[in-house]
Image (tube, rainbow, N blue to C red):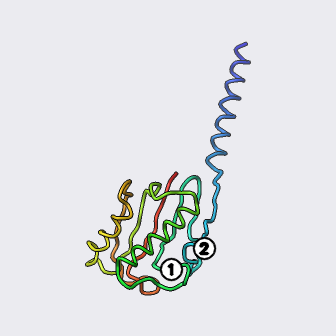
Amino acid sequence: MKIITIVVIFLVVGFTYLSYKAQLNSTSTKVIYTTKAPKPIGSYSQAIETNGTLYISGQIAINPETNQLDTNNLNIEVSRVLSNVNAILTEAGYEKSNVVKVSVYLKDLGKFQEFNQYYSQYFQENKPARETIGVASLPKNVNIEISAIAVK
């Protein structure tokens, strides 16, 4: 009887371990694309979703309807960029409350306060973690680029 009990315990532990290991190794990765955000201008995806986490590539102020830049002033530029981020979130079935991390690349850190004023209107609740990095230049000579990570 003891041998049967030991064998059953060994089998249960073994199958549990194998099931856990299979779950760790199985990642479901999905490319996210929407026409409501700009087409990628390089060899990257708008976003990738894997295991309940959405990674949104850096977005700049391209209007997806006209394929033109919306850079008349910083407010319009920030609004366009966040609109593009939001379109990708929506396409993937996420909300801005799911955003946990934002990376901001700003060409002129002297405009940080102005940027932050517009940015805070978008993330009024559930403010994600964020860093703002000053850069020398950005694609298409824009003033700002934003990438984000969201989790369900």
Relative vertical location of residue 16 with respect to residue 78 in this rendering, above or below: above
Q: Residue at x 64, y 61 (%)?
A: 30
**Residue found at the far top of this picture:** 1
Residue 129 placement, left or right of 85: left
Q: Give the mark count.
A: 2
| Kind of residue indicated by mark 1 | Asn
User: How far from the left and from the top, in percent, is residue 53?
Assistant: 54, 56
Judging by the rendered image, the residue that carries numbered circle 1 is 63
Nearer to me, 9 or 130: 130
Give me the residue at 29% from left, 69% from top: 117
Residue 51: percent from the left, percent from the top?
59, 53
Q: In the rendered image of this protein, does residue 56 appear above or below residue 15?
A: below
Residue located beneath label 2 in the image: 35
Q: SS for tag 2?
A: loop
Q: Nearer the viewer, residue 66 or 119?
A: 66
Taking 19 as reference, is 80 left or right?
left
